[in-house]
Image: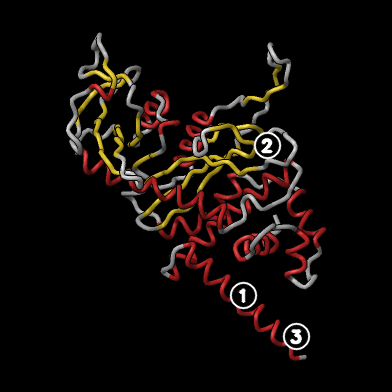
């Protein structure tokens, strides 16, 4: 891998605005590097999760803590509405908009220590199996590996890489009994939200299960229960919160550390918000959706470049004591100032 080009490309994603193209990068460097060289960088080899870990590992080792670390999982969709479908550009259900959208579905794993959140692994969901709908005779795609399977593999890789963490957290999509059991058997703790219709009982061998929302639960109090299909006790707690529109909602959380109370479980789970900030920064600050790449490898490598650029922005954010958006704004203000000065010089020449 050409590290000089990786540095230049990720800096370009970090500092740029609008469409991120090889031509714009070449122009920004005054033609010092041709756009063809940038294109070759994106298209000659695959930059994957192993590559990411190799690059972020030295920094993770500096900030890691023996206790308190958390692995946070979540996925997002890089919209590609005008790009031809392939194994990674496909139709995915986006729960944010409540409908299927065409794009690249990216599952990320971050390790969180206090105020630092570093991406340590990622996978692009591949819809690599084509099938024909019996009724419409239209071709569709599906994935041979599910997101839960990707997640479990990534947890195992993080353990093998000796990433220091105590907790694994994700949203309800990943709260399957199989995933919970997998994490528990590896000596790690999990905190997952569960749907209100998830079946639970008070004893291991109960014959009758009830929905979570039918349990008598006091807010912020943990009760030890058994989820149907999971042969280990979990602490179940209820958190009542108020939405921005004034409506109220309920969040049910389960944790395999039954010594924690409801307040402690929720306090730890709040770290999961870091992954939402990560997705927002990838799209707003780092041009995740601003690349016109058309080929599967270059599309995948652009995703890697954006995630690596996030890592660099996170390091700068910690160093400067500024959040990602404030730091990006500072860069853009400086760019506008330089453009304004140039304009005045042109006008007076």
- Relative image position of residue 225 (x, y in whole percent): 23, 24
Question: Under tag 3, what secondary structure?
Answer: helix
Disc 2 versus disc 1: distance between alpha carbons?
Answer: 35 Å
**Do tag 2 and tag 1 residues touch (Cβ < 8 Å)?**
no
- Relative image position of residue 316 (x, y in whole percent): 49, 66
The quadrant of the image that shows the N terminus is bottom right
- Relative image position of residue 117 (x, y in whole percent): 44, 54
Answer with left or right where residue 294 lies relative to residue 70.
Answer: right
Earlier-in-chain disc, 3 versus 2: 2
Residue at mark 3 = 346
Question: Under tag 2, what secondary structure?
Answer: strand
Earlier-in-chain disc, 1 versus 3: 1
Answer with left or right where residue 159 lies relative to residue 254.
Answer: right
Q: Residue at x 71, y 17 (%)?
A: 132
The quadrant of the image that shows the C terminus is bottom right
Disc 3 versus disc 2: distance between alpha carbons?
Answer: 44 Å
Residue at mark 1 = 336
Please give the label number shown on residue 89: 2
């Amino acid at each position: 891998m050409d590290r000089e080009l990786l540095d230049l490309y990720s800096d370009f994603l970090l500092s740029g605005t609008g469409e991120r193209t090889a031509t714009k990068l070449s122009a920004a460097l005054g033609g010092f590097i041709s756009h063809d060289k940038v294109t070759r960088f994106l298209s000659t080899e695959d930059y994957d999760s192993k590559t990411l870990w190799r690059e972020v590992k030295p920094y993770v080792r500096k900030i890691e803590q023996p206790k308190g670390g958390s692995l946070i999982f979540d996925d997002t969709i890089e919209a590609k509405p005008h790009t031809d479908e392939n194994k990674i550009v496909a139709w995915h259900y986006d729960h944010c908009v409540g409908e299927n959208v065409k794009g690249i579905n990216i599952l990320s794993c971050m390790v969180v220590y206090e105020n630092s959140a570093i991406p340590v692994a990622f996978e692009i969901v591949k819809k690599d199996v084509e099938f024909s709908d019996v009724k419409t005779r239209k071709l569709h795609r599906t994935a041979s590996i599910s997101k839960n399977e990707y997640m479990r593999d990534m947890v195992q890789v993080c353990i093998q890489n000796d990433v220091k963490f105590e907790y694994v957290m994700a949203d309800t999509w990943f709260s399957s009994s199989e995933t919970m059991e997998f994490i528990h058997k590896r000596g790690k703790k999990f905190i997952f939200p569960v749907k209100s219709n998830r079946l639970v009982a008070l004893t291991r061998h109960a014959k009758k299960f009830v929905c979570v929302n039918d349990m008598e639960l006091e807010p912020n109090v943990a009760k030890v229960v058994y989820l149907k299909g999971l042969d280990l006790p979990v602490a179940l707690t209820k958190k009542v919160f108020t939405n921005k529109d004034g409506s109220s909602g309920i969040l049910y959380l389960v944790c395999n550390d039954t010594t924690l109370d409801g307040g402690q479980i929720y306090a730890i789970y709040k770290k999961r918000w870091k992954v939402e900030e990560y997705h927002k920064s990838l799209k707003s600050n780092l041009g995740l959706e601003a690349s016109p790449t058309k080929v599967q490898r270059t599309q995948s490598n652009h995703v890697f470049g954006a995630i690596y650029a996030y890592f660099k922005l996170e390091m700068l954010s910690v160093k400067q004591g500024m959040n990602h958006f404030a730091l990006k704004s500072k860069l853009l203000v400086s760019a506008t100032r330089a453009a304004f000065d140039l304009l005045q010089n042109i006008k007076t020449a």
